Image (spheres, rainbow, N blue to C red):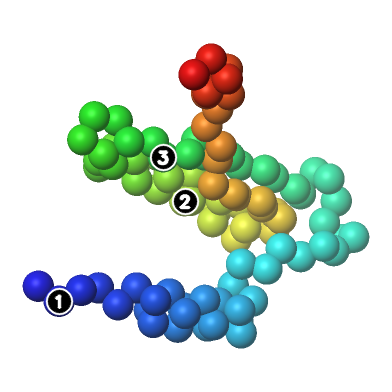
Amino acid sequence: MAKYPFESIEKKWQRRWEEEKTFRAVEDPSFVKEKRRYVLDMFPYPSGAGLHVGHPEGYTATDIYCRFLRMNGYNVLHPMGFDAFGLPAENYAI
């Protein structure tokens, strides 16, 4: 099986997204606080044998919700989440 050329594919899409400003967050005073939304997903963590079909299920739901909000005039920030369920304390103990 041929190796996946992720570097060239990633660069291609990153360039296109940059040109089209696909993920640009607009700082526009016309977006009043009532029209701002922040939707956060939990960071995907390997459980057992690694990532599984349950991981994209949650992200699909929030992606649909964020797209719906954007189509209805909301300014939405939807970053990848951060998982720190006791991890800093656990790392300190180690």
Provide the residue designation for mark 1: 2
Q: Are marks 2 and 1 in contact (CB under 8 Å)?
A: no
Question: Please, what is the three-letter code of the amino acid marked with disc 3?
Answer: Pro
Q: Is residue 20 above or below residue 40?
A: below
Provide the residue designation for mark 3: 44
Tell me where residue 72 sits by quadrant: bottom right
Q: Earlier in the sequence, mark 2 or mark 1?
A: 1
Provide the residue designation for mark 2: 64
Q: On the picture, is 30 further left or further right than 20?
A: right
Circle 2 SS class = helix
Rounded to the nearest angstrom, the CA distance separating label 2 from label 1 is 33 Å
Q: Residue at x 50, y 35 (%)?
A: 42
Q: Is residue 80 above or below residue 9?
A: above
Tell me where residue 20 sits by quadrant: bottom right
Label 3: how many Cα within 10 Å (few below 14, some 14–19, many 20+): some
Q: Residue at x 52, y 76 (%)?
A: 14
| Along the viewing direction, whichever of 35 and 44 lies nearer the viewer | 44
Q: In the rendered image, which quarter contains the N terminus?
A: bottom left
Rounded to the nearest angstrom, the CA distance separating label 3 from label 2 is 18 Å
Mark whose residue sits in front, 2 or 1: 1
Question: Please, what is the three-letter code of the amino acid marked with disc 2?
Answer: Ile
